Amino acid sequence: MEEEKEKKRWSVAYTKHIKQKRKVYHDGFLDLHISSNKLMLYDESDKLLECRMLRRDEVVSSAQTLTFAAYFVDVGHLQSPPYLNFSDARKKSNEVKPIDRSLSPSQKIIREFKKNELQKYVAQQTGPTTTKASV
């Protein structure tokens, strides 16, 4: 219980593609241990990826990008205790809230295209099935 009071946890999207134009993001979370000012980056299966100390002038907040030695981290929403890892959260709810981050125009177009294609596919699967007779 006291450990939960001494840390804050954010949902994040992180990438190890620091120098590439196209970055592939993964879900994870970021813990800030208040007493030691230590930031700890975890993947969605609770595996520790990297940790570092918070600088004196540095503040962690939502919609911010942090730089680790091997990762860029886009900070999402602050979670409230008790903290759940992603697998536990998915078991409770099928819907996982996306992390708000600004997308480039091309990423927005791609996201819309994928959404439309998915809707077409779902509509075809649920629609009535008709067969054409061969002549």
Image (cartoon, rainbow, N blue to C red):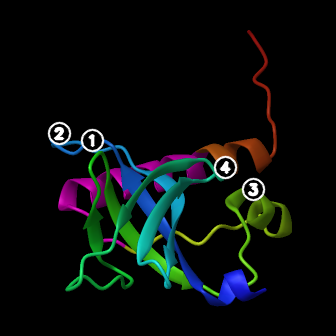
Tell me if label 1 and label 2 are in contact, CB under 8 Å: yes
Identify the element where label 1 is drawn.
Answer: loop
As shown in the figure, which amino acid type bears the numbered disc 1?
Answer: His
Q: In the image, is 94 to the left or to the right of 64?
A: right
Q: Residue at x 21, y 45 (%)?
A: 18
As shown in the figure, which amino acid type bears the numbered disc 2?
Answer: Gln
Tell me if label 4 and label 1 are in contact, CB under 8 Å: no
Judge the density around disc 1: few (<14), some (14-19), many (≥20) Cα neighbours within 10 Å: some
Residue 11, compared with residue 82, is above or below; it is: above
Quadrant of image for the N terminus: bottom right
As shown in the figure, which amino acid type bears the numbered disc 3?
Answer: Ser
Q: Residue at x 29, y 77 (%)?
A: 64
Of callouts 3 and 1, the N-terminal one: 1
Position of residue 31 measured from the top left corner of the image (x, y, whole percent): 52, 71
Of callouts 3 and 4, the N-terminal one: 4
Q: In the image, is 86 to the left or to the right of 65?
A: right
Q: In the image, is 46 to the left or to the right of 116?
A: right
The residues tagged by marks 1 and 2 sit, at their Cα atoms, a distance apart of: 6 Å
Of callouts 3 and 2, the N-terminal one: 2
The residues tagged by marks 4 and 1 sit, at their Cα atoms, a distance apart of: 20 Å
Residue 8, compared with residue 40, is above or below; it is: below
Q: Which mark is residue 41?
A: none
Residue tagged by mark 2? 20
Q: Which mark is residue 45?
A: 4
Residue 86 appears anywhere in the view: yes
Closest to the observer, 36 or 41: 36
- Residue 4 lies in the magenta-colored region: no
The residues tagged by marks 3 and 2 sit, at their Cα atoms, a distance apart of: 29 Å
The residues tagged by marks 3 and 1 sit, at their Cα atoms, a distance apart of: 24 Å
Boundaries of the magenta span: 101-120
Residue tagged by mark 1? 17
